[in-house]
């Protein structure tokens, strides 16, 4: 059953989000909490779509180190078997007499050749062993060049190092209410400057008898700070200019609400601009809560302590009756009012169906 609540038609839509309006063709949230897009591509083979460079840049450190070690061991095992196949007689200086000892000699000769160390006791004599050693030496310096480039790329890749609160809150604000979330830089010496934020909202509305998504820019208390050494609580006042005016938690679920957050700033360490995305779905928005302060003065009174462990801490803060004002609808004959359909996840339509 459709709700009677309507969106003020005078509010300007944002048609530049990059998301479509067809509510039937989307599954799950648009943007994941880590900032990646919730999208899977088809129509091309996996190898055509796969970016090994991106994969290696974004691997966790321990996996990246494991990949390098495993590759080094496997490539040397391969060449050790190749030297055994060619014949240990083509390697001068081999002292081993048992099969296992010969394999070890071949393996460690391979590691010396691959890394171009070349201690000198064992060296190739025959054409087959020389050819294999030449190919291995070439693969060795190419592999080290690739590994060096990847490690440099991982270290130098600009990263915002921001953490976001798990939930956005609808809190009391200046006699009314506001939607709030907060974030903070968590790395020492990575304070951002000239930080800008943009927050959009996606709503499922009823237009001409069908469900469509509409997107709006949310007006914020402030959209820019000159420096960000501490946390920033982003505030969207819920007033007559807000598409969330008079919304309840049930209304947000029916409208399949999702907030899209984009932050950009300049990082002095990287000497470059960085950005980070995240999103909040209706299930990640809590009513009648407010954040607790997350910084305090040090015991000696000489510095300020930013308590990152309090980023998600909040307390009950009931809204007074009527705090989310309900202004009279704007009368416009030529502009239809988008209406919340009430077809939320229960109808199996749109992103909220699979949100977590």
Image (cartoon, grey):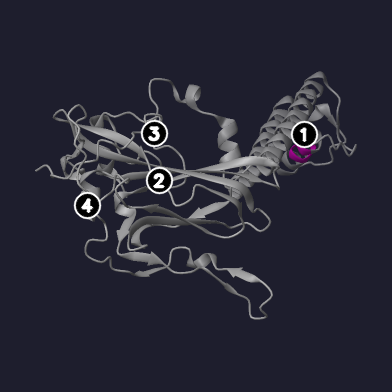
Q: Residue at x 66, y 46 (%)?
A: 267
Q: Secondary structure at mark 4?
A: loop
Q: Residues within 10 Å of mark 4 (few under 14, many from 20)?
A: few
Residue in the picture at 68% in, 80% down: 300
Per the image, the residue denoted by label 4 is: 326
Q: How many marks?
A: 4
Say which element carries label 3. loop
Q: Check contact, mark 4 vs mark 1: CB within 8 A.
A: no
Q: Nearer the viewer, mark 4 or mark 3?
A: 4
Residue matched to label 3:
39
Circle nearer the N terminus (4, 1): 1
Residue 39 location, x and y as percent? 39, 33
What's the CA distance linking mark 4 and mark 1? 73 Å
Q: Label 1: few (<14), some or many (≥20) within 10 Å? A: many
Q: Is residue 252 above or below residue 27?
A: below
**Mark 1 vs mark 3, CA separation in Å:** 41 Å
Q: Which residue is mark 2?
A: 219
Q: Bounds of the magenta span?
A: 106-111
**Label 1's element?**
helix
């Amino acid at each position: 059953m459709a709700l009677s609540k309507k969106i003020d038609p005078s509010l300007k839509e944002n048609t530049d989000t990059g998301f479509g309006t067809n509510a039937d063709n989307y599954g799950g949230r648009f943007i994941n909490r880590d900032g990646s897009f919730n999208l899977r591509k088809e129509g091309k083979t996996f190898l055509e779509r796969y970016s090994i460079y991106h994969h290696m840049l974004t691997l966790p450190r321990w996996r990246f180190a494991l990949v390098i070690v495993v590759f080094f061991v496997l490539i040397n095992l391969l060449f050790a078997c190749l030297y055994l196949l060619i014949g240990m007689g083509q390697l001068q200086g081999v002292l081993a007499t048992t099969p296992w000892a010969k394999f070890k000699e071949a393996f460690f000769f391979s590691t010396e050749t691959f890394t171009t160390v070349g201690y000198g006791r064992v060296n190739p004599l025959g054409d087959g062993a020389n050819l294999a050693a030449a190919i291995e030496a070439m693969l060795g310096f190419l592999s080290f060049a690739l590994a060096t480039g990847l490690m440099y790329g991982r270290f130098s890749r600009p990263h915002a190092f921001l953490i976001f609160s798990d939930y956005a809150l609808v809190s009391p604000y200046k006699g009314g209410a506001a939607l709030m979330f907060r974030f903070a830089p968590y790395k020492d010496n990575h304070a951002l400057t000239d930080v800008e934020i943009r927050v959009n909202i996606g709503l499922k509305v009823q237009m001409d008898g069908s469900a469509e998504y509409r997107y709006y820019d949310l007006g914020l208390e402030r959209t820019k700070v000159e420096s960000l050494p501490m946390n920033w609580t982003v505030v969207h006042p819920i007033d007559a200019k807000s598409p969330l005016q008079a919304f309840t938690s049930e209304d947000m679920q029916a409208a399949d609400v999702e907030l899209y957050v984009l932050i950009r700033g300049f990082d002095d360490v990287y000497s470059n601009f960085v950005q980070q995305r995240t999103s909040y779905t209706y299930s990640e928005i809590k009513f009648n809560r407010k954040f607790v302060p997350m910084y305090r003065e040090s015991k000696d009174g000489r510095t300020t302590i930013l308590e990152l462990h309090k980023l998600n801490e909040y307390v009950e803060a009931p809204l007074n009756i009527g705090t989310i004002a309900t202004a009279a609808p704007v009368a416009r004959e030529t502009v239809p009012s988008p209406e919340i359909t009430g077809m939320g996840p229960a109808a199996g339509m749109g992103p909220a169906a699979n949100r977590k």
